[in-house]
Amino acid sequence: MLHNHFPNLRRWLLMLACMALCTGTAMAYDFEVNGIYYNKNGTVEATVVSGNGYSGNIVIPETVTYGNDTYAVTAIGESAFSGQSYLTAITIPAASRPSAVTRSTIVQRCRR
């Protein structure tokens, strides 16, 4: 009976659920500092992850402070710079340096 009074309710709820899921997965990071997005790896380490609109020269710090906590930046996610065609340079600290295979993947994905 309720269905007859609200014929578009089911469609509207489905659309709302899809929008909520898409929004949640598009921004999958724990925190952002100075335009760089990070995920926490435990309590003292962080990984650079995919973010919106990386461009220009990016300098990844050796450590990053968020709130009252300082994290060592120890990794760069495989897709961190995927599709970021406006990047001109990425400076990576020695502690975060990826392997040659990962470096080529980072460069290839920036070009797409």
Image (cartoon, rainbow, N blue to C red):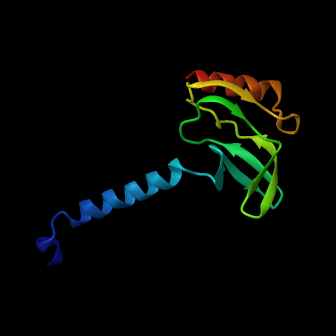
Height in image: 80 above or below 109?
A: below
Looking at this view, name the residue that lies furthest to the right: 94
From the viewer's side, name the closer residue of 1 and 72. 72
Q: How many labels, in total?
A: 0
Q: Who's the residue at 83% across and 35% down the image?
A: 93
Residue 58: % across, % down: 68, 32
Residue 95: give x, y in percent of width and height.
Answer: 88, 39
**Along the line of sight, which residue is nearer the eye, 107 or 90?**
90
| Closer to the camera in the image, 59 or 48 | 59
Residue 24 located left or right of residue 29: left
Judge by depth and name the residue closer to the eye, 109 or 5: 109
Which residue sits at x=58%, y=51%? 28
Residue 81's place in the image compared with 26, above or below, is above
Q: Which residue is drawn at 60% across and 32% down?
A: 82
Q: Residue 21 in the image: x percent, y percent?
A: 45, 56
Picture quadrant of residue 68: bottom right
Quarter the N terminus occupies: bottom left
